Image: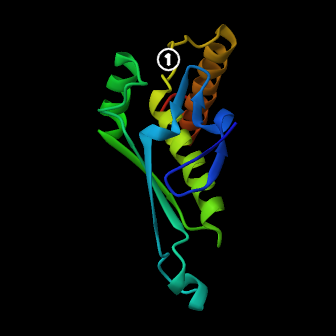
Amino acid sequence: MLRRDENGASRDDVSAVLRVSPSLRVPLEEISWRATTPGGPGGQHANRTASRVEVRFDVARSPTLSSHQRALLLERLGPVVTASSADERSQARNRQLALERLAERLATGLRVPRRRRPTAPTGAAMARRLEDKRRRAVTKERRRTPRLGDE
């Protein structure tokens, strides 16, 4: 079944969610977007078309997020997450790129880094280190001026 969004563009019900991670899918109704003219050079096309797209996701008010997800995103990204794109001439393509960037930012904000487990050096590594120290000590010892009676 095809539906129309607020701008009259048709979209499939299947694609009415933004897949962030296997555990999180955000309905597109929770994402607001705005189109503006892109800055910089580009001639008549850039000056007349609103092809730059900015998407915003309100983390604090989203009913889709669990309390744990909301807490992580609020701590790491803040109450509102935005992404924009002005890479392409097409507004539709820029909207797609902006949504992909938003999904990437949300996924990064939700990712929990692995805990670092400290490791001990191996026996061979310790032996190499001690051998290198002995070699260096001998080299430095040979640089010294000989003491009387040592020769």
Rendered residue at 52%/19% (across/down): 114
Rendered residue at 54%/78% (across/down): 49
- The residue nearer to you, when weighing 88 against 8, is 8
x and y percent of residue 101 in the render?
55, 48
x and y percent of residue 130 in the render?
59, 18
Q: Is residue 139 above or below residue 9?
A: above
- The residue nearer to you, when weighing 11 against 51, is 11
x and y percent of residue 7 in the render?
52, 58
| Callout 1 secondary element | loop
x and y percent of residue 79 in the render?
29, 39
Residue 146 shows up from this direction: no
Q: Is residue 115 above or below residue 36?
A: above
Question: As drawn, is 141 to the left or to the right of 1?
Answer: left
The residue labelled by disc 1 is: 116
Rendered residue at 51%/86% (across/down): 47
Rendered residue at 55%/70% (across/down): 51
- Looking at numbered disc 1 in the image, what kind of residue is underneath it? Arg
Q: Quadrant of residue 57?
A: top left
Quadrant occupied by the C terminus: top right
